Amino acid sequence: MDWITLLRSLQSDFIKRLTSGCLLHCETEGQYSELTIISGERLKALREFCWLMAEKYKRVSPVRDVFISYLKGKLGEEVVKERLADFITEVDYEKRFGGDGNIDFTLTSDPSIGIEVKSRHGNIDRVRWSISSEEVEKNAVVVCILIQEDVSEAQSQYHLFLAGFLPTRMIKLKTGKISFGIDQLLYGGGLWCYLEQLQSSLNNSSRQQPSIYKYLPKQEILSKPTNNQLLKSFFQPEYNNNEDLNTLYVKLGDEYFEKGEYT
């Protein structure tokens, strides 16, 4: 079983459990959780920040529209910040306008690896996330967050689901923007490991070493994995003279594009 098949299988199981409400909920920072709940002082701080941004850009758009846009974006970013913790660094919001900028986070140890967060509210069967060709070019992954409640000034608590992620190298654009549903995403539990492996491959490449990887199922697990390493045991590098990691993802993207899965 290859790693994409594994994460797709886990995603199918996650979607079933999302419908029934049986989800993994961990409040420990840096550990994986399918559900994140934001309320109280934490939500108050987000609201205050978003009102400041709304006031700052009130000449560009109506204040309430800017507030809602920023709050949606910040709620999604809070999920990713809590799950990846010190592994990532936030891009300064005040240096750009809008809740969905081109890059939301970078890896702390490698700022060249960008992460885009997309937050949406809607029914699980109909909600869609979209990404532009520019965002694909500037980011290594897009992380999708599903907000259960309608975003407003009065909402006192938000239930946020890490709906999944996609490596941008798997996304092929026919036009300037595409959209995708939750069933087309990879299971969020593989995000940390994917970024680690991507970082490792880029580091090896920068040292002009033969950074060639192919992910295959590991035959045995030598030690019990932590939550962050839940899927890491399934990813094992194998030397191959013909294709590096980037070529592999481009190839995979072509295959899924031909199947009509990312159009």
Image (cartoon, helix red, strand yellow):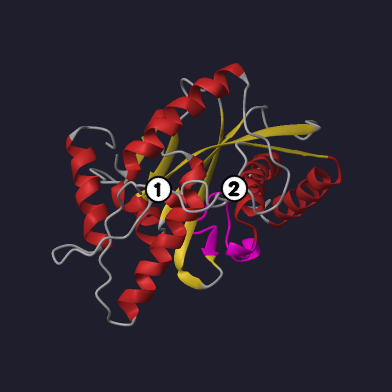
Quarter of the image containing the C terminus? top left
Mark 1 = which residue?
220
Q: Is residue 201 visible?
A: yes
Q: Amino acid at mark 1?
A: Glu
Whole-angstrom CA distance, mark 1 to mark 2, is 18 Å
Q: Residue at x 60, y 55 (%)?
A: 84
Q: Amino acid at mark 2?
A: Asn
Membership of 247 in magenta stretch: no
Q: Is residue 66 above or below residue 260?
A: below
Residue in front for this viewpoint, 31 or 93: 31
Q: Residue at x 50, y 59 (%)?
A: 103
Q: Nearer the viewer, mark 1 or mark 2?
A: 1
Residue in front for this viewpoint, 226 or 67: 226
Q: Residue furthest left?
A: 242
18 to the left or right of 85 = left
Segment colored magenta: 86-106
Question: Pointer 1: residues within 10 angstroms few (<14), some, or many (20+)?
Answer: few
Total marks drawn?
Answer: 2
Quarter of the image containing the N terminus? top left
Residue in front for this viewpoint, 81 or 218: 218
Nearest to N terminus: mark 1 or mark 2: 1
- Element at label 1: loop
